[in-house]
Amino acid sequence: MQGQIATWTLAAATLFRFGPPVIEALRPYVDDDDQQCRDTVRSIIERLEHPERTWDQCENRLPRLSWTRHDPLSFDFWEATSP
């Protein structure tokens, strides 16, 4: 389960970086049977449609990554792996 959450987190951050054009590609998955997929898609869409909202103001927040990094969609894989 922990591995799946990490995979979804990386996928969410990557999809989010595509910006608003990705919304229409994700919309068919808003009501997906897989809860992690559904939650991830709803979070990405909400953040792209309402960029003025902070993580705390969003209705569809993804789980915190850690105490220091709470917003998975702001995760920068390249920054995290740099020395």
Image (spheres, helix red, strand yellow):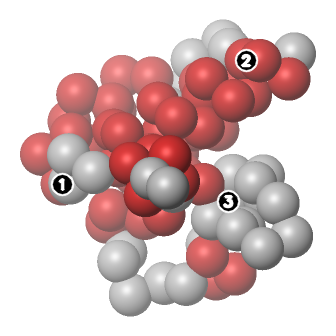
Which residue position holds label 2? 4
Q: Please tell me whether residue 39 is drawn above or below residue 20 in the rendered image.
A: above
Q: Which mark is residue 1?
A: none
Percent of width and height locating residue 76: 43, 55
| Amino acid type, mark 2 | Gln
Which of pointers 3 and 2 indicates the residue nearer the eye? 2
Q: Which quarter of the figure is the N terminus placed in?
A: top right
Q: Quadrant of residue 50?
A: bottom left
Question: Please, what is the three-letter code of the amino acid marked with disc 3?
Answer: Arg
Q: Which residue is mark 3?
A: 61
**Disc 2 to disc 1, how far (Cα)?**
25 Å
Dot 2 falls on a residue whose secondary structure is helix
Specify which label sits upstream in the sequence, 3 or 2: 2
Q: Position of residue 70 (x, y in %)?
A: 72, 67
Compared with 76, 37 (above or below) is above
Q: Which residue, as the protein is rendered here, is positioned at the far left?
A: 21
* Residue for point 36% across, 39% down: 14
Neighbours of disc 3 within 10 Å: few (<14), some (14-19), many (20+): many
Return the disc, 3 or 1, that comes first in the chain's sequence. 1
Q: Residue at x 69, y 81 (%)?
A: 56
Q: CA distance from mark 3 to mark 1?
A: 18 Å
| Residue 59, x across and y down, in percent | 66, 66
Instruction: Give the amino acid at mark 1.
Output: Pro
Of residues 43 and 63, which is closer to you in this image? 63
Residue farthest to the front, as pictured: 83
- Mark 1 sits on what residue? 20
Looking at the image, do the residues carrying marks 3 and 2 touch, with CB atoms under 8 Å apart?
Answer: no
SS category of the residue bearing label 3? loop
Q: Above or below — where is 51 with respect to 69?
A: below
CA distance separating discs 3 and 2: 17 Å
Left or right, 22 with reference to 6: left
